[in-house]
Amino acid sequence: MRIACIPGDGVGPEVLTASLPVLALAASRHGVELDLVELDWGGERYLRTGVAMPAESLDVVRSCDAVMFGAVGRPDVPDHVLVRGLIIALRQELDLAVNLRPVRSWHGVPSVLRDAGGIDLVIVRENTEGEYVGVGGRVKRGLGGELGLEVAVHSQPVIERLARFAFDTARTRRRRLSLVTKSNAMYHGYTLWDEVVDEVATDYPDVVFERVLVDAMAARMVQSPRSLDVLLCSNLFGDILSDLAAALVGGMGMAPSANILPGSSPGVFEPVHGSAPDIAGRGIANPVACLLSGALMLEHAGLLPAAESVRAAVATALSDPSHHTPDLGGTAGTATLAEAVLTTLEAQRVDQPVPAS
Ligand code: GGG
């Protein structure tokens, strides 16, 4: 597999460098070698050249089977310049319709909840339009009474495509799907979501379907997260709720994601967290979100046993608190945790069924 690697900014290079040997070993054990193509896209390149990624970026990415992405953002560049210029641009230009954000609890990992055991949900986030489509403007700049307009765009084909993916995902899990909107107040775009998803739901009578307003969902995720399975969300709501979900299972360092167009490649696989400039360069960032994003990449490439072997090794490493990074209450560094995962993976017998993680 030819993998484009975009370490990006802040802790991005640290977590990606730590994760790649694990992913390479898991893949090679299942007969696939990873050919890594490193790309210097991100904030430093923006400061040097005026753009975060070059004009031919799509050709470069399309020549690869997948993209592993670290993080984007640095304090000396306005956040929106890099987020829009890199990660949102890749999602939109490659038409990566689905942002898949699975969240689960891990044995031994502390949580803000008294009992976080058994949380296992997946957020299916719309990824190319909604509130992040980039339509709007600012007028009367510098004249007083300035206006800022941000127009959300929701389209039937994009909602329907995403909804079918979410229902298909629910069929591989506990067959429960919650559509998250705010259609009581934002009643143009979100009533369209309600109607389109209601219609799709009729094709999936075996999936228990409900509509939940985003504010109620935020409360429910804290109060009864185990009642949730698949959450189908717009771009904005999926972005917000996935941070909340991550916080329930140990924090942002535990949340992986996949940007994919089902049945197509390349997808872009990235930890949900950003560049964390406050801890960048100190070797203490949690690599788990990046490792699990790599597992999603292997799974998307059809290497499910390799993906499961990474998840099982992560579970084993996390069960020992001496491997925990500071965000999990420990004192271990990025390399210590990643090496514990690698050592566990090395010790796994390839012909052995992967233990349930
Ligand atoms: N690791 C991905 C990253 O750096 N994300 C920063 C971010 O703010 N992303 C916005 C988004 O996911 O929509």
Image (tube, helix red, strand yellow):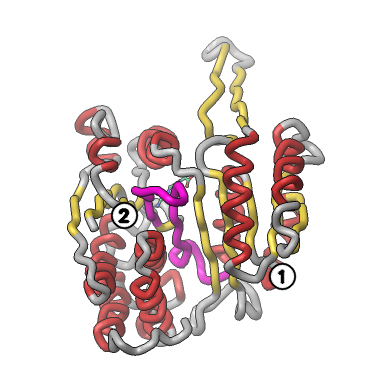
Query: Mark 1 and 2 residues: CB-CB less than 8 Å, in contact?
Result: no
Q: Which residue is mark 1?
A: 227
The crowding category of the residue bearing disc 1, from other C-alpha atoms within 10 Å (few below 14, some 14 to 19, many at least 20), is few
Q: Residue at x 62, y 31 (%)?
A: 152
Which of 219/347 is in front?
347
Q: Kindly identify which residue carries mark 2.
A: 68
Q: For the residue labelled by badge 1, is the local secondary structure a helix, a strand or a loop?
A: helix
Is residue 32 in view?
Answer: yes
The picture quadrant where one finds residue 34 is: bottom left
**Label 2 CA crowd tier, 10 Å (few <14, some 14–19, many 20+):** many
Q: Quadrant of residue 288?
A: bottom left
Q: CA distance from mark 1 to mark 2?
A: 32 Å
Q: In the image, which disc is placed on residue 288?
A: none
Q: Could you tell which of marks 1 and 2 lies nearer the N-terminus?
A: 2
Q: Is residue 268 magenta?
A: yes
Q: Which residues are magenta?
A: 248-270
